[in-house]
Amino acid sequence: MKYTLKINSIKSVDELDGSWNNADFMELLTRFDYADADKLKQNELKDFLFMAISDFEPDEAATIVLDYKLSDVLTEGQIDNLSHEMTREKVSENYSDISIHKILFDINQLLYKAYNGKFPKATANVIDFEMQAENDEEITKALVLQSFATGLSDRNLIIRLFKDHLEGKVPFPEAEGILWNLESKGNAQYRVTTSEKWLKKEDFTNLEFECDVTPFIGKSEEE
C-alpha cells in the first residue's frame, strides 16, 4: 500500500487534555482523606487535590494514584515497586508494559505538578500530519508507524526495536501502546500523541515523503 505523508508539526507538551476530570479529582480527594470534597466548587477540585496530595510522602501519594488507575492491571507488589521507581525515573518511558505508558505519563505529570517538581518531568509529543492513501484503507496506529518509518532516522528507537513489525513480517500490537492516541481531523489530516522517547522532531530525516507499506497478514486456520 502506497502513501504520501507530510509532517505538519511536532509539539512538545507536559500535560494531555482530558486525562483527568472532576470525577477523578473527587475520587482522589476521598482517597487522600479530604472529607469535604462534595462541598468544593468544580473549579477548586484540582487545587485542593494538590494540597491534599502534598500532605503525603511522594511514594505514598504515588501508591494511592497508581492503585486508583491501575489496580485492575498491576499487583499490589508491582504498584509498590512503581511508587518508588517513579520518584527517580520516567516510568512512563521505561516500564516494561508499553500498554500502560500513557496512564503512567498522566499519573507522573499529576504528581510532578502537585509536588512542584519532586517527580521527573516527562514529555509527550503531539504530531499533526497529512496522510494520503491510494485507496481507502483504514488508518490504524500500526499503519501510521509503518508509514512513519520511511522518514525516520536509523537511530530512532522504533526502527531499532521493531524492524520486523514495521516490515509487516510479524503482528504489531505494541503500536497501540506506542501511539497513545490517533485522531482523524478530516481531509486526510491526522494527529497522534506519543512519548518523546518514541518520536521527536530530530528523529525525522524527512518531513515529506512517500512510502510503501506491507501490512501484516496472518495465516488462515487452514494453513
Image (tube, rainbow, N blue to C red):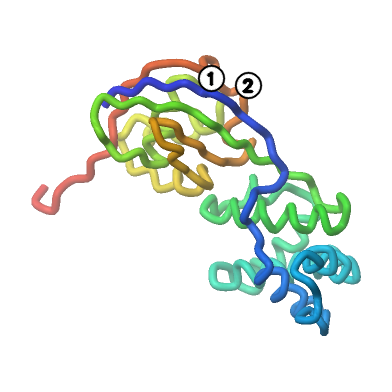
Mark positioned earlier in the residue sequence (2 or 1): 1
Rendering coords of residue 169 (x, y %): 30, 35
> Please, is residue 83 above or below residue 91 in the view?
below
Residue lying farthest to the left in this orientation: 222
Rendering coords of residue 154 (x, y %): 52, 21
CA neighbours of label 2 inside 10 A, class few (<14), some (14 to 19), many (20+):
few
Rendering coords of residue 37 (x, y %): 78, 79
Residue lying farthest to the bottom in this orientation: 35
Across the whole image, how many numbered discs are drawn on residues? 2
Give the amino acid type for the residue marked by disc 1 in the picture.
Ser
Q: Quadrant of residue 30?
A: bottom right
> Please, is residue 145 above or below residue 69 in the view?
above
CA gap between label 2 and label 1 equals 8 Å
> Please, is residue 103 above or below residue 4 in the view?
below
Task: Identify which residue, 16 or 112, lies in the foreground.
Answer: 16
> Please, is residue 79 above or below residue 35 in the view?
above
Q: Quadrant of the N terminus?
A: top left
Residue positioned 44% across, 26% down in the render: 130
Residue positioned 30% across, 40% down in the render: 138
Residue positioned 65% across, 32% down in the render: 11
Give the amino acid type for the residue marked by disc 2 in the picture.
Glu
Secondary structure at badge 2 equals helix
Residue lying farthest to the right in this orientation: 55
Task: Identify which residue, 138 or 201, lies in the foreground.
Answer: 138
Residue positioned 49% across, 28% down in the render: 129
What residue is pinned by disc 1?
153
Asked whether disc 2 touches disc 1, contact meaning CB atoms under 8 Å apart, the reply is: yes
Task: Identify which residue, 143 or 77, lies in the foreground.
Answer: 143
Q: Can you tell which mark lies on residue 122? A: none
Rendering coords of residue 59 (x, y %): 81, 65
What residue is pinned by disc 2?
202
CA neighbours of label 1 inside 10 A, class few (<14), some (14 to 19), many (20+):
some
